[in-house]
Image (cartoon, rainbow, N blue to C red):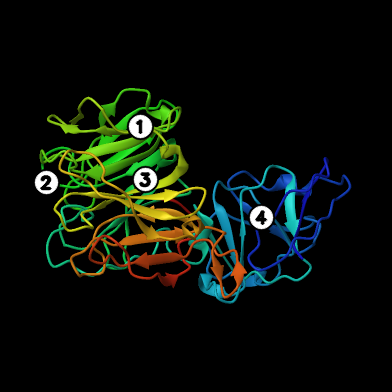
Amino acid sequence: MRKRFNRGIAALVGLTLAGTALTVTTAAPAAASSYDCPSGYFCGWASESATGSMWKTNKNLADLGSWDNKIHSYVNRTQSIACMYEDKNYVPWGGYSAQEPNTPGEWASYPVATTSSIKFVRTERECSQPAYPSWYSEPSPTAAGFGDMNGDRRADVLTRDLAGRLWFTPGDDTGRLIGSGGWNAMNTLTRHGDFTGDRREDLVAREKATGKLWLYPGTGTGSLGSRRLLGASGWNSMNHITAYGDLTGDGRSDLIAVQKSTGALWLYPGASGSRLGARKLIGSGGWNGMNALAGMGDVTGDGRPDLYAREKATGKLWLYPGTSTARLGARKLVGSGGWNSMEHLIAVGDFSGDGRPDLAAVTNENLVIDGYQGHPGWLVTYRGRAGGTLYGAQRTHGEWWGLGDFA
C-alpha cells in the first residue's frame, strides 16, 4: 500500500491512488530529507523513507531510464498533478496513480517500486484521457436554432473542467480549448440561442463572488467573444438560471430563474442591445421544489420552446410547455422517477439526427448499474419523441467523470 507521511508533525494526509486502498499510517519525526526537494519539482528516492540519493524532474518523462521501477518514496512539489504510470510512455491501462501537489515535508511511499513514466497534468482525468469528454452527435436535418455553436448542424457541448478551463466539443469526438482559465469563478453556465441578434449562439454565466451576470457572445466558430455585462448585481439571489429560448415570440432569446427566497419563477425577456428587459412573473411559487431546469427548445412541435424540470422530492421529470402568452402551460409527466441519479441535465438540441430536441445527462453516485449503486460520470442520452416525451435511456460510457459543469 502507498503511504504518505509528513515529517516533523507526523500528520497523515489522504492519497489519491487508482485501484489501491490507503493504509492509515503515521511517522515519527525524523530528518527532513523530503524538504530537500525544491519547489517546482517531483522528487523520488529508492528508500521508503525519502532519504538517501534523490532523483528529481519537472518535465514529462516517458522513460525513467536508470530510475525505472526504482522509486519507493516520492514528493510532488510542482503545481500540477503527477501521473505515475507502471508502464513506459504514459500508458494508463497497466495501472497508474495520481499525486496532487504536496506541502513541504510530506512524502508518500510504497514497498514495491513500479513507476516507469511520469506526466504532469492539470486534472486527474488527464492521466488517462483528454481533459474534455468524448461527445458525438449526428448532423441534424435542419439548423435547430440552438445547440450548434459552429454552424455544422451538430449539437455541441461546452465543458468546464476542474482546473477552470472551458472546452468546446463540436460533436465529432474532438475538443479544443476556448477558455484557458478562470471559469471556476462562475457558478452557473447556460446557453440556448442568440442574445445579441447576430444569429450565433451565446453563453450566459453568473459570477459567484459578485452575483453579476455576464454574456459571452458566440463567434460562430465555437469560440466566445469579449464578455458583456448582462446583470449588474443580485443574481446570487436566484437559482436555476436557465437560457430558455424565445418564449415571448419577439425573436430574442429569454432567460428564466427561480427566486431562492420565494420559489417564484421569473421570465427575463431578451431585449435589443444585448440586454434583458423587465422581468415577468410566470410561476408564483413552488419552484424551489425543483432541483434542475432544462430549456429544451420545441419538444411539443407547436413552434414554442418548452421546459423540463426535475422534482427534488420524487426524482420525477416534468414537461412545462411554452404558451402563446409567454407563460408555461399545464405540466406533463416525462419521467416517473430516478432522475435524481443525474448530476447534470444537458439540453443542446438534436444530437440524434432526427430533427427533434434530445436530452443528455451525466450521472452522480446514485446511479445503479446491475444492482450496484455508485456510478458517477456516465453519459446517458435520451432521444426526443413526438409530443414532448423521451425514448428510453441509452447508457453510452462512463468517461464523463472528473469534470465541473456543462452547457
Identify the mark at residue 377; answer none if there is no mark: none
- Which one is closest to the eye, mark 3 or mark 4? 3
274, 64: nearer the viewer: 274
- Residue 124 at what x, y percent from top left? 54, 57
Q: Are marks 2 and 3 in contact (CB under 8 Å)?
A: no
**Mark 3 = which residue?**
180
Label whose residue precedes the other's in the sequence (2 or 3) = 3
Residue 171 visible somewhere in the drawing: yes
Label whose residue precedes the other's in the sequence (2 or 4) = 4
140, 158: nearer the viewer: 140
Q: Residue at x 33, y 69 (%)?
A: 391
Q: Residues within 10 Å of mark 1 (few under 14, many from 20)?
A: few
**Mark 4 = which residue?**
43
Label 1 amino acid?
A: Ser
Q: Can you say which quadrant of the picture contains the N terminus?
A: bottom right
Query: Horizontal placement of 175 versus 222: left or right?
Result: right
Tell me the distance, in whole angstroms, between the alpha carbons under discs 3 and 4: 28 Å
- Residue 108 at what x, y percent from top left? 73, 56
Label 2 amino acid?
A: Arg
**Mark 1 = which residue?**
284
Tell me the distance, in whole angstroms, between the alpha carbons under discs 1 and 4: 60 Å
Q: Secondary structure at mark 3?
A: loop
Q: Are marks 1 and 4 in contact (CB under 8 Å)?
A: no
